[in-house]
Image: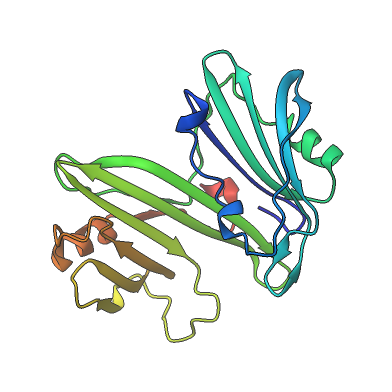
Amino acid sequence: MRNDLELSVTLARTVPELPEDTMLAGAGPDDHLPDPVGVEVSGRPATVRTVEGWRHGEGTGPNLYVFTWQPADGFWARAEMQTTSLDQALDHLGKVRFDQTRRCLLAIRPGHLPTGMSVVERIVSLQTDPVQGLRVSSDFTISGGGRELSLRTSDYANRTRLTTTREPNFVSEDETGNDWTMAYGGRAISVSNPHRDGAFSKEEVMRIVDGLRFADRIDDPRTW
């Protein structure tokens, strides 16, 4: 994600298995969501829905484009993109590769995980700020044995109460025992149990957080 571009791509075996459009899910009653029209993405037939001047915060932002197509036989893709024109959207989308696998660089990696659990989803978000420079957030979902836990780490971003030590501090647990927030490793961390079944204790959560491994310079991808 950058100031003039935001792109999300999801994959599935069939079109019905593709998740709902996450950006379009925030549409208001006055938003017009047009019918799809035919285009080509990297020489493959596709459809696109265009919403001009998509709402962004209090004002309007770039256009929103939602593409659905088959990048290769055997699977489908849906891409949601905010940018300034259809030509730019198609150019950006043409650079997305589906024919190779690359290691995902991570500024923060989970280390200690409970027995039988593993990371099943990772999301890394990068955003440039004219004052703060590169801002990084990392999301992990760990699962196993009928249990699931989501972790999100981000920079403090105006949360001046949080210190920058590597010791856990300002840890808070909600009354249901399913959500925890804290400062750790110079980051703000939120942990959530999506099943809301009290399957994790605070002590177990803290062991997971204590096992997080941080890059030497989170704001410098060359150190990841």
Q: Which residue sits at x=71%, y=64%?
A: 55
Evaluate whether residue 216 shows in this view: no
Q: Of all residues shown, which one is farthest toward the top? A: 73
Give residue 205's position: percent from left, percent from top: 21, 61
Q: Nearer the viewer, residue 46 or 197?
A: 46
Residue at the far bottom in the pictured view = 161
Residue 1 in percent (x, y) is at 65, 52
- The spot of residue 141 in percent (x, y) is 34, 48
Q: Identify the residue at image location x=26%, y=40%.
A: 118
Residue at horizontal 77%, vertical 28%?
38
Residue situated in front as seen by the camera: 195 or 30: 30
Viewer-side residue, 167 vs 193: 193
Judged left or right of residue 169, residue 1 is: right
Considering only vertical position in the picture, is 73 above or below 142?
A: above
| Residue at (50% x, 68% y) in the render | 155
Placement of 83 over or under 189, stated as above or below: above
In the image, residue 163 sits, relative to residue 222, either above or below, namely: below
